[in-house]
Amino acid sequence: MGRITLDKVQKSFGEVEVIPPLDLTIEDGEFVVFVGPSGCGKSTLLRLIAGLEDVSGGHIRIDGKDATLVPPAKRGLAMVFQSYALYPHMSVRKNIAFPLRMAKMDKAERDRRVQEAADILNLTDYIDRRPGQLSGGQRQRVAIGRAIVREPAAFLFDEPLSNLDAALRVGMRLEISELHKRLETTMVYVTHDQVEAMTMADKIVVLRAGIIEQVGSPLDLYHTPKNLFVAGFIGSPKMNLLDGDLAKPHDATTIGVRPEHITPSPTEGTWTGKIGVSEHLGSDTFFHVHMEGRRDPVTIRAAGEVDMHRGDTIYLTPNAERIHRFGADGLRMP
Amino acid sequence: MATQHSRSAARTMMAPAVFLLLVWMLVPLILTLWFSVMDYRPLRGTFECCEGLGNYIRFASSSSFQDAIVTTLIMVGGILLITVTGGILLALLLDQPIWGQGIVRILVIAPFFVMPTVAALVWKNMFMNPVNGLLAHLWEFFGAEPISWLTQVPLFSIIIIVSWIWLPFATLILLTAIQSLDSEQMEAAEMDGASPIARFFYIVLPHLSRAITVVILIQTIFLLSIFAEIFVTTGGGFGTRTLTYLVYQRVIESQNVGLGSAGGIFAVILANIVAIFLMRMVGKNLDK
Amino acid sequence: MARAIPTSRRLAFTALAWIIGLLIFFPIAWIILTSFKTEAVAIADPPVFVNFEWTLENYCLVGLFPEADAQGNGGWLRGLMCDPDTPQRSDYTRFLMNSIVIALGSTLLGLLIAVPAAWSMAFVPGKGTKNILLWMLSTKMLPAVGVLYPIRLILIELNMLDSKGSMIFILTMINLPIIIWMLYTYFREIPVEILEAARMDGAGLKEEILYVLTPMAVPGIASTVLLNIILAWNEAFWTLTLTTVDAAPLSAFIASYSSPEGLFYAKLSAASAMAIAPILIMGWFSQKQLVRGLTFGAVK
């Protein structure tokens, strides 16, 4: 069981308040991702849940029991660190067995569980090696193994994939999602990468400066971002945010259109511009279009290969139903 | 960052070290300060208050004090010059690809581990002795008149002995610093057309400047209190009496504790001037 | 270095480095050679380098192989190595024991005080930590001669002049800042995340120190111990000024050769060789760590 409730949780370092009072409920079995730019307090929030930092105010409840003052070791949570934090002087087997040893579990049961975890994570071949002899991906698996053996109430992940190269990251992403489906245990996952958030989460929590900007399912956030920050943060490539005369016809201060919701044409359309950089990926083509009187180019995405090039004049038509309108306060207009 | 609990535990664990060092530093220093304003000559049974600054003035105005300051400066300066330039050259040499580098390194480091008393005695008797010393034989071999090192050039002789001990130290530290130089930086300079000499002056030397400063400061701290090397070679005679040795003679040999204590305070002040600079360097390093 | 260096250049550098290395090492080699000579050979003119009759006589004279004690225990090694007519002139083993007791004692005591202090400063740094560290270092800069007399006086009052206990304490205090600093720089390299991981894995403070911190810190502690033994072994201000007989270590023992016995080169050499050998060997093993310890972490 792993239902985590944050009730007016607040954290200050000295004079500086990094997290103003904040409420959040993480349901049992949910995969929740904290996402936001660096310095937004997402890691601090995770560490507060873990108990590695004291809260300055408010309460943390795990399965209804107040855990605010419970030391990390007694909260029944497991954590996977960014640097993996494996014990360099222990073999893979001993690393994974460590939490069980701390729980004074008997040896036979310990060995059985370690073996089981090693099987799940394909670690059997390396089980007697030291962490120093493993690749980044393997170390990552050991760290996960160490977390799963003790069957925690919830897993906490602190940017676990940021030290891996791009190809491995995609693989590990899938593995962690698989693991979640299999274990059905609560997972709280911190990342600055919105792609990770979109692909893995049941529920995304977007943070900025310690404040929750929006909570919702990935598609909620994609379709109805509550404000400009979320609109700009979720989605890749980024949503085009246009103001001034382009926003006026829609009665808004700013309008947002995602690159995939603009149709390009060599002959006719609502807006005109010149193609700057174009990125031909084969499956998609991205154009950066410079429009008269605008500093930032508009990004558009066309499916497949498109025969238009740098310097060509291009006409753009936004999909009227997919235009997001924002007021002067940066909030979404109905 | 940590939790409240671990913070109070930390304070408890630090307490013994802080307390002991505080006592170790303050109690003798306060006693020395106290003695320095007294007329305190235990052999005559004099222990009278109060000289005020009398001891300080007497100590500072004596010619032996001025001589001692000059001797100290020449000795420390000479040793620093030899060890730092020698250390840089040796470190550069040892950084080259040479066969048996590990062994050469061991040979070069060795003198640093030799006890100061042993180094001084061996040099004094087996090398610098004008009759049987190895250097005398060497001089004779080239047809020159052997030198009586410790009476003719005593200060220089002590500089050589101490430099022999500290050259390995400078070399070891500078070599470590050179080896920490990013090789891509050197390659970039090479691509930019810098000659080996330009690379030394524009890349290597600036990179070493920190380590050189550290070497100078640390050696100065240790060299200001050189004792054993003088004790066993000249016993402070022939113009080799440094400030440290002068204070030692006043306090222990002639048992004029008041006067010697005033001298000791001068030594403390001198060392503190150097220490301030060293602390700044080390302190900056802590922030990283 | 991925590029080939011309062999001629490499040869030249190698030759130069070896010549300089051997020159610097020569005095030590000369001590060792002379220690195996007879006194007559030791002062031969011109000097003899290796082609002489090697003898252990000097080591026997100085007392490397101790005689049997009053109960007749020990002494078998002496019977094996020495001419029965060679007298034992000095009590090398006693000075050696003093050196060992003082060096090890001050190192152990130092560790006992320094490990908790360095641990807390490395892992639970507060606002004042930096200043405390610098202040500790500053006590090391206090010139010994400035506080010599008061300490002598205190020891006389306590009736502890020339005692091993007081030497252990004094050397501990002298080297404590270096020990704390060295341990601190080592501890700081242990990632905090690993200790946090241990906490998450259910380890309490005791388990954390026992199973995670200590095994990871062992290499650092080992080199700290090594450096401290070297420093304590070679210390020659306090040992020369505060010990006479009972607590005198090897550094004081050698100083007793300063005159006129110093003219007996072979015996002086044997005594010197025995005084420096243990430390020379230890030093070679710890040269890398030495840099860090002696520069208070400013150069790594």
Image: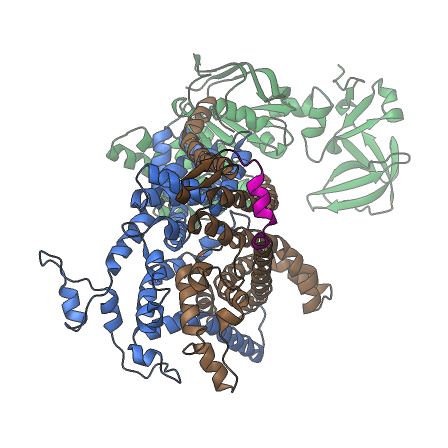
Chain colours: A green, B brown, C blue
Residue C186's spot in the image, x, y percent? Answer: 46, 44
Residue A136's spot in the image, x, y percent? Answer: 49, 46
Residue A261 seen in the figure: yes
Q: Main secondary structure of the magenta part?
A: helix
> What's drawn in magenta, residue-wise?
B50-65
Nearer to the camera, C5 or B226: B226
Residue C2 among those drawn in magenta: no
Nearer to the camera, A268 or B210: B210
Residue A122 seen in the figure: no
Q: Residue at x 57, y 20 (%)?
A: A11
Q: How many numbered dots are placed on residues in this image?
A: 0
Rendered position, C58 above or below C171:
below
Q: Residue at x 78, y 17 (%)?
A: A329
Q: Quadrant of residue B156?
A: bottom right
Residue B255's spot in the image, x, y percent? Answer: 43, 47
Question: Left of A290 or right of it: where is A234?
Answer: left
Nearer to the camera, B13 or A87: B13
Residue A108's spot in the image, x, y percent? Answer: 24, 35
Q: Quadrant of residue A182?
A: top left
Q: Residue at x 59, y 16 (%)?
A: A22
Rendered position, C95 above or below C152:
below
Nearer to the camera, C222 or A169: C222
Query: Quadrant of the image for the C terminus of chain B?
Result: top right
Q: Quadrant of residue A43?
A: top right
